Amino acid sequence: MLTIAGKTFSSRLFTGTGKFSSPQVMREALERSGSEMVTVALRRVDLADPADDIMRVLDRERFFFLPNTAGARNHKEAVRLARLARASGGGDWVKLEVTPDPRTLLPDPVDTLLATEELVKEGFVVLPYINADPILALRLQEAGAAAVMPLAAPIGTNRGLVTRYQIEIIIQQATVPVVVDAGLGAPSHAAQAMEMGADAVLVNTAIAVAGDPVAMADAFRQAVIAGRLAFKAGLGRVSDQAAASSPSSGLEFIR
Amino acid sequence: MKIIVNGEDRQAPPGITVAAYVATLGFDPETVVVELDGQILGRFEYDERRLAEGAELELIRFVGGG
């Protein structure tokens, strides 16, 4: 079981709710994923479409909602979005995202730390989305972040564990859960992150834009379970030299 | 009277409450967050706060995101 800020999750796959082709596909995929935590964003309502409401589509008994601050370009905008999320009945949890550059969507480390300090002071449970920077992860942990969410690769790129080495260091050092977020494009990427000892992964694009999002959600579900099992089982050592798996003795009869 | 809702000019009956106005737009007030003149309102305030000429309302809700 994974525990973040006192709340336990049996699934270590967190899912995003963006980019799905329809609310029905999203609901079916998220149910198949086994995920218990889903991220949502905050936006102006569409005045022409009052019925367009994600809260009607997803069962809040089944899914814990993690509002994000996506779209915030600095700490002030992020703090404002977090307060709005709380006012909307979204609870005290927030996935803190501060992305000033729309081209890379890379997070601003300075404003992320500032916003974390502010939001922790206001009683939020803060899960900051960060570049895979081990020192920043420690600073955020000290500032009271409930988890850290280092990126595998930039959002929506499906490039996999580009930041593998830095994430290994973050996992070694962290005392809060590490959730690998962004860029995981295939179930094998998610399995790798879990094998390394990540506490959870967050996947959105790779499921939402798959040819069959429901089947892909199932594939990620199984990959995360497999990766976690492998981590707990203890992976064999990596070696430069070959080591025979079959006995080297008892071969006299063929010589 | 004229008010501004999500950046659009709209007409509203003078003195209408936030809850009543949001309902006239077709929204269940329970499903939206409201900022009135830059200030976030708690749910309990929707029935109490009234709109004045030129009021700026922001109606916000959860949408799909990662």
Image (cartoon, coloured by chain):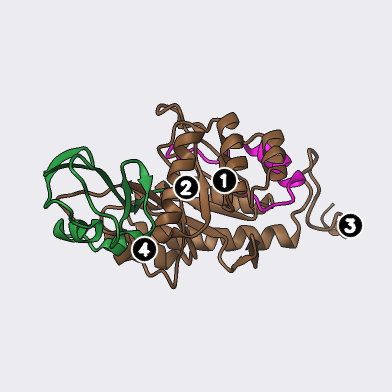
Of the numbered discs 2 and 3, the one sitting upstream in the chain is 2
Regarding residue A15, the answer to whether it shows in the image is yes
Distance between the Cα atoms at labels 3 and 1?
Answer: 65 Å
Provide the chain ID for the residue under circle 3. A
Query: Do callouts 3 and 1 point to residues on the same chain?
Result: yes
Q: Which of A97 and A197 is in front in this view?
A: A97
Mark 3 Cα shell of 10 Å, populated few (<14), some (14-19), many (≥20): few
Amino acid type of the residue tagged 2 in the rendering:
Ala
Provide the chain ID for the residue under circle 1. A
Regarding residue A68, the answer to whether it shows in the image is no
Query: For the magenta stretch, what is the residue range?
Result: A156-178
Mark 4–mark 1 CB contact (< 8 Å): no
Q: The brown chain is which one?
A: A
Q: Which of A171 and A101 is in front in this view?
A: A101
Give the residue pinned by disc 2: A82
Mark 2–mark 1 CB contact (< 8 Å): yes
Q: What is the quadrant of residue A254 in the picture? A: bottom right
Which tint is chain B? green
Give the residue pinned by disc 4: B44
Of the numbered discs 3 and 1, the one sitting upstream in the chain is 1
At mark 1, the secondary structure is helix
At mark 4, the secondary structure is helix
Give the residue pinned by disc 1: A119
Identify the residue at image location x=64%, y=48%: A145
Q: Nearer the viewer, residue A37 or B8?
A: B8
For the N terminus of chain A, give its image quadrant.
bottom right
